[in-house]
Amino acid sequence: MAASIRLLARRIVRDAFRTINSSVSVRIVSSSCPSNLSACRCFSDGAADKSTHFGFETVSEGEKAERVYKVFESVAQKYDVMNDAMSLGVHRLWKDMLLHVMNPQPGIRLLDVAGGTGDISFRFLNYVRSQQERVARRTARANQTPSWQEISTSYTTPTEGIEMETEARESRAVVCDINKEMLKVGKQKAESMGVSSGLSWVVGDAEELPFDDDQFDVYTIAFGIRNVTHIDLALQEAVRVLKPGGRFMCLEFSKVTNPLLARLYDAYSFQMIPVLGEVIAGDWKSYQYLVESIRKFPDQETFKQMIEDAGLFSVRYHNLTGGVVALHSGFKL
Amino acid sequence: MAALLRGLRVGRALRGFGSVVVPKTSSPQCNGLRRGFHCAALRLQEDKDKSIPVPPSSAASSTTTYHEHYRSHPFKNNTDTYTQEAPAPEADAKEAPQPNTSYADQSGEQGEEYETEEQLQAHILNAALDFVQLHGWTLEAISAGAETLGLSAASSGMFQNGAGDLVLHFIAQCNAQLTEQMAEQHNQVQLGQAEPKKTAEFLRDAVETRLRMLTPYMDNWPQAMSILLLPHNIPDSLKHLSTLVDDIWYYAGDRSTDLNWYTKRAALTGIYNTTELVMIQDSSEDFQDTWNFLENRIQDIVNMAGAAKQAASTGEAVAQGLLGAAVTLKNLTGINQRR
């Protein structure tokens, strides 16, 4: 009986670790769980045997998550600066394009996975606010020259309930990232920008999101999905947390179509970027991992197929900057 | 005690299992992610059966269904019925593909899903028509329409052409409705149950019916017309206009195969467009000025056709007369005589 209570205690501990959502913890607990117990569900035993790519290296799946975590932990402070330096500021245009294609209506809930420093969420909140302001300005201007009809109806009816309704629907953005350091940097940015309402910061693993089903209108993952160990699990989680009719949007580096541009791009990636990483952030290896992981990511059509396999419909992609970045979008119907 | 602990352990194992496998808490017919689309479809059905919002254009007796319309007296009172009853035939078609649980027939299933995706878009656009009075012909109307169907507002992103999709869908729907009514009328004439109309009268009734379908949206129709004139929409809007005019002439009985085919259609296109423009700024009771204008324009065409015929026959008569005069002159001068 004492033995079974000890088992129960171990199980409780393992469940607690699972809610923290780090695959590293699962590995630690599994080593303490004796293998001859049939009730012990040690998923990571299988993971330790399977291998995956970490840049151009081959590592075990459990190890990949840990190493990715370390990469982003070390680059977190200089992340935004490095983005600007490496892409010569073009990443801002890519993210603006993502928002432009998303065209969010006021009142929408956004989940920004691997959102890290919160670039997408800040843009989202700005976009929605400016749209609301534009609508408010338009109605104000329309009200300035009302027709006789409108004046007479406004005397009889009470104040317009419709406008009140749209104002009450505030849009909210949730930034979710597996890495606490990146979220910390994001929170600091939010404070310095004075953005506080409508934004929340959650630690979570893209393969196992800490949210209920059917919660969000839009799910975005910008330059994060190539770091996920099991991309199909992340896509399945996206389908789970999206509302029916919700939109999945993914911004990611992809295959360049033009061969000349491809050569230039390769040369720039492998020669310049790790050097910039060393000079600006003092971290050659993280940026070496970054450019290698871009090469390992599937191309536009393959990724589109993966998205369709996960159960999303009306999947399309746009190539930005000649295929350097691809914006994939699908709907949960 | 051991049994109790074993039970708890099993319970925890199942829950742990459940947190990894994607949970599906909705209707029991849905298994697997691929069925998710059918889940949404079924949910749409349930939602539609439960609550259908009353359209803001509250004309009298606005809840006649699509089928009732179909049976009603043709070319009369075809206003204000783009409620969600309109896609009733589409809904019947969608109930047919029940969610099948077999993974075997992948290719057939893919075809089914593609069809229902377009049907879903049509559903959303139909629902969006109710919000046109409020938001105009914009993406906001489409988002509001999607929300009434239980979908997220983000699904309006499916329509890459935005408001253009909504307007084109609407005019396609109107044209289809008109064609059905004309076909019905044609059948009745074939069966001998109704008298065939004269061409001018038929044209007038057809154009009037078609334009009356616009009356619920008359406040925002100028915006819709401007959307149709955007460069990327022009090919589609011209296509719809040309098929409309062609259908009207076909049911009016035109089977010409010469230059008349073009002149007739050009004339009717002109009439239709100008009448539409008059209708936009018409403030008379029940658009009576517009119908008078239409009547006059059709009379003009009829007169012109008559005048053209008369001119042709006059020309012929004149030519014959001249020929006769020439022969007489030749006779008088004696040229014609054989020597």
Image (cartoon, rainbow, N blue to C red):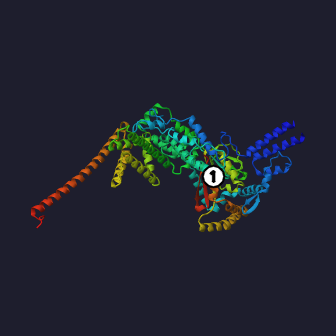
Identified by mark 1, the residue type is: Glu
For mark 1, does the 10 Å Cα neighbourhood hold few (<14), some (14 to 19), or many (20 or more) residues?
A: some
The residue lying furthest to the front in this view is B339
Q: Where residue A284 sits in the image (x, y, percent)?
A: 72, 64
The residue depicted at 72 percent of the width and 56 percent of the height is: A72
**Can see residue A221?**
no
Q: Where residue B30 sits in the image (x, y, percent)?
A: 66, 42
> What is the secondary structure assignment of the residue under circle 1?
helix
**Can see residue B234?**
yes
Horizontally, residue A152 falls left or right of residue A191, namely left
Of residues A9 and B325, which is closer to you in this image? B325
The residue depicted at 87 percent of the width and 42 percent of the height is: A6
The image shows residue B6, relative to residue B271, as above or below, that is above
Q: Chain of mark 1?
A: A
The residue depicted at 73 percent of the width and 60 percent of the height is: A54
Q: Where residue B66 sits in the image (x, y, percent)?
A: 48, 38
Q: Where residue A150 sits in the image (x, y, percent)?
A: 44, 36
Numbered circles on residues, count? 1
The residue lying furthest to the top in this view is A156
The residue lying furthest to the right in this view is A2
Quadrant of the snapshot with the C terminus of chain B: bottom left
Horizontally, residue B265 falls left or right of residue A140, namely left
Of residues A56 and A175, which is closer to you in this image? A56
Quadrant of the snapshot with the N terminus of chain B: top right
Q: Which residue is mark 1?
A: A308
The residue depicted at 75 percent of the width and 48 percent of the height is: A21
